[in-house]
Amino acid sequence: MIRLAIIDDEQVSCDSLGDLLKRYFEEKKQAYSLKTFTSAVQFLNQYKPLYDIVFLDIELNGEDGMEAARKLRALDDKIVIFFCTHLAQYAIQGYKVKAEDYFVKPVAFSDIKIALDDVCPRIEKEKNPMTLNIAIKNGVRRIPLSEICYIESKGHTIIYHFANDILMVRGNSLASMEKKLLPFGFACCNVSFLVNLSHCVSIAGENLRLSDGTTLKITRTRRKEFIKALSDYFAKNGIAEERR
């Protein structure tokens, strides 16, 4: 869910922007919540970091919207700030408070769509880092993919290897896990091991060295496919390869 706030002392502007936001999220079929405030003081006095995005009028009656943005940024360094103004030159100082952008009133739906199409996926990604839900005896354990060094298949047991720990569960075949995790930077170096490519350090012949100090064998039948996957991953992430 994306949580939004509008701070504007003009009711017509609040209603108009609220209608645009409602249209955007309904078209996207995306959950959202919206709350409006007629005063920045009202918004800031009991502020809690509950919001993802705030639309802030710069020309508030009796208040300095830019100063309100500075105070907000001091309280919350992650919230996305959009300025709303009748005069664009008032918004040029927005970089000082890391404002995302500004809208000139009356705000157009096309501008809202472009801006939110950009920021909403980023917000959702930060809220929901890539994780793997692993069924365990008493429930489910949610593990960030980045923490998994490699996954081992031994009989009917799947063993998740972390930097300083392991987790053993009864699980699916390694082939099915490879299919599931392939888009997230995992590849099999042999029939028993599915490797997180971000933890690969070097290759020397058939030996693959991982960040936790483990060395795994790359089989001949898997070598070409695995090397390509690793090279593509390194290139995509700007990582220099170490191979001998």
Image: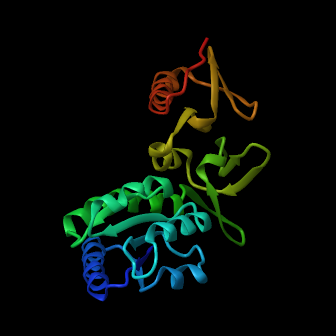
Locate the C terminus and report the quarter of the image it occupies. top right
Q: Position of residue 114 (x, y in %)?
A: 26, 59
Q: Quadrant of residue 18?
A: bottom left
The answer to whether 241 appears left or right of 216 in the picture is left
Out of 158 and 60, give the one closest to the viewer: 60
Q: Position of residue 231 (x, y in %)?
A: 48, 25
State the residue lying farthest toward the right. Answer: 164
Q: Position of residue 85 (x, y in %)?
A: 31, 69
Out of 52 and 167, give the one closest to the viewer: 52
Q: Residue at x 23, y 70 (%)?
A: 107
Locate the N terminus and report the quarter of the image it occupies. bottom left
Count of numbered circles in the view = 0
State the residue lying farthest toward the front. Answer: 62
Q: Residue at x 55, y 76 (%)?
A: 50
Q: Quadrant of residue 20?
A: bottom left
Q: Quadrant of residue 60?
A: bottom left
